[in-house]
Image (cartoon, rainbow, N blue to C red):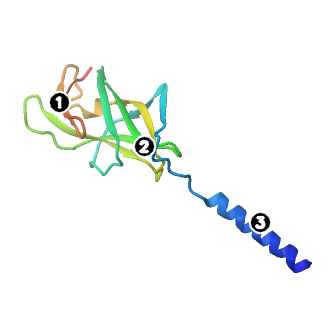
Amino acid sequence: MKKFTSKIYLFISLFCIVISCATPKKNSDKTTVIEKNQNYRKIKAKIGELNNSDPFDIKNIEMQNNTLLISLSYTGGCGEHSFEMIGSESLLKTNPPKRKVKLIHKNHEDYCKKIINEEISVFISDLSCTKMKGAETILLLDGWDKEIKYIYK
């Protein structure tokens, strides 16, 4: 009887471990959409290296003073995601000057399939060619096919 009881406890323990480590089922038939409209995620742009990014889609961009509002979507839903905006150190020698910029998304290994819609507020003053009121810089955002005219305020 003692051997039988210990085998039952072993079986129950293994069963609990397997269940707790199971990955969520993928639902290929339906996609759930989560709206994150409470507040914008706020980040500050910086100059640096344009690193790799996990996938996302830019839906819309709006300029408000020294802030760029970006509406975007990405897949996830099981963990936190992070974003940073990086501008290239070098400027293209045009009039007005142009700077390549990239929004970098890190999914932190969240491979769930829900579609997340989010709006990000990016303070972009460090992307200006000169920090003088009225200075104009054209931002060339990776993943967005239009030039973004930025006038430092």
Q: Earlier in the sequence, mark 1 or mark 2?
A: 2
Q: Earlier in the sequence, mark 2 or mark 3?
A: 3
- The residue sitting at 18% across, 30% down in the picture is 146
- The residue sitting at 87% across, 73% down in the picture is 5
Q: Amino acid at mark 1?
A: Ile
Q: In which quadrant of the rendered view does residue 105 lie?
A: top left
The residue mark sitting in front, 1 or 3, is: 3
Residue receiving disc 1: 138
Residue receiving disc 3: 12
Measuring from the top left, give residue 4's x and y in whole percent: 86, 77
Along the line of sight, the residue nearer the viewer: 45 or 52 = 52
**Is the residue 136 above or below the residue 84 in the image?**
above
Q: Amino acid at mark 2?
A: Thr
Q: Residue 18: which numbered mark, if any?
A: none
Horizontal side of 18 relative to 32 (left or right) equals right
* Label 1 – label 2 distance at C-alpha: 30 Å
Check the picture and name the quadrant holding the C terminus.
top left
Label 2: state its secondary structure: strand
- The residue sitting at 8% across, 37% down in the picture is 93
Along the line of sight, the residue nearer the viewer: 29 or 31 = 29
The residue mark sitting in front, 1 or 2, is: 2
* Label 1 – label 3 distance at C-alpha: 63 Å
* Label 2 – label 3 distance at C-alpha: 35 Å
Label 3: state its secondary structure: helix
Residue receiving disc 2: 75
